[in-house]
Image (cartoon, helix red, strand yellow):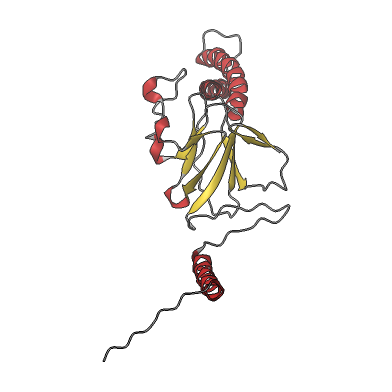
Amino acid sequence: MLQRRGMGLVTPSSAIPFICTALMTLASVASAQEVPIVEAVSGQTVAAPTPNKDMVRVYVTSDRKGAVFGRTAAFGPGTRKLRWPRRPEDEPNYSGGVCTAPCSATVAISRGPYSVVGHDVAPAERFALHLAPSGLDVDVHAGSWGGYVVGLAFSTIGLVFAGLGGAELGVWGATGAPPMSSQSVGSFFLLQGSIFLGVGLPLAAIGLPLWLSNRTQVDISEHRTAGSKGVELLPNGFAF
């Protein structure tokens, strides 16, 4: 025997609790899937999270244009000949660099060592990076390639001539020959030794300071946060 059940109409007052329950359920599910957002406290800099412990953010600055930062191995075998001006075959592989100062980049610590090169930048010693939560400042005090090569050449030639001149004067002194005697071997050593010494000492005096002052130095320190630094040089301007 079939029975008919009548379907009553749903009134608005009975639908409200059902709609509210559905909305609350959807809101709780959505909030559970959200990624927590780090909120910055006033006066505090929030650093971007480092991908892993092998990565570090570097901020590269240089007092000479054209300083390229990157992995030493990526620049190629290095300068084959110390000559000035440079020839194209003596140039490093600049395309293998990470960036040109002033710049910043995130690099892998384990892929070092790193170095800095440039067309008119004297060679720098290789250096390693270390982990720092706020990043690393890589300050490049770049020397001139021309000054470096000329200073090194003058220093080498000057020291060689001065050494030979001093040795010949020592031989002359050991022979006991009179200074004005032109018939003795000792006088020959006196004359030639004096010339060599007179040429070598000025060259060394000029070349050594020129060479030493044009060596590229790289200072690495922990990156200064916005609260501890005054003015920061950026690619598109200055930050205070």
Q: Residue at x 66, y 47 (%)?
A: 224
Q: Which of 177 and 159 is in front in this view?
A: 159
Q: Can residue 20 be seen in this view?
A: yes
For the C terminus, the quadrant is: top right
Q: Position of residue 223 (x, y in %)?
A: 63, 47
Q: Where is residue 109 in the image (x, y as percent from the top left)?
A: 47, 51
| Residue most extreme to the left | 1
| Residue most extreme to the bottom | 1
Q: Residue at x 53, y 76 (%)?
A: 14
Q: Where is residue 160 in the image (x, y as percent from the top left)?
A: 51, 23
Q: Residue at x 40, y 35 (%)?
A: 96
Q: Which residue is drawn at 52% across and 27% down?
A: 66
Q: Is residue 108 left or right of residue 210?
A: left
Q: Can residue 161 be seen in this view?
A: no
In the displayed structure, would residue 240 be above or below residue 16?
A: above
For the N terminus, the quadrant is: bottom left
Q: Where is residue 69 in the image (x, y as percent from the top left)?
A: 49, 37
Q: In this view, does 163 lie to the left or right of 78?
A: right
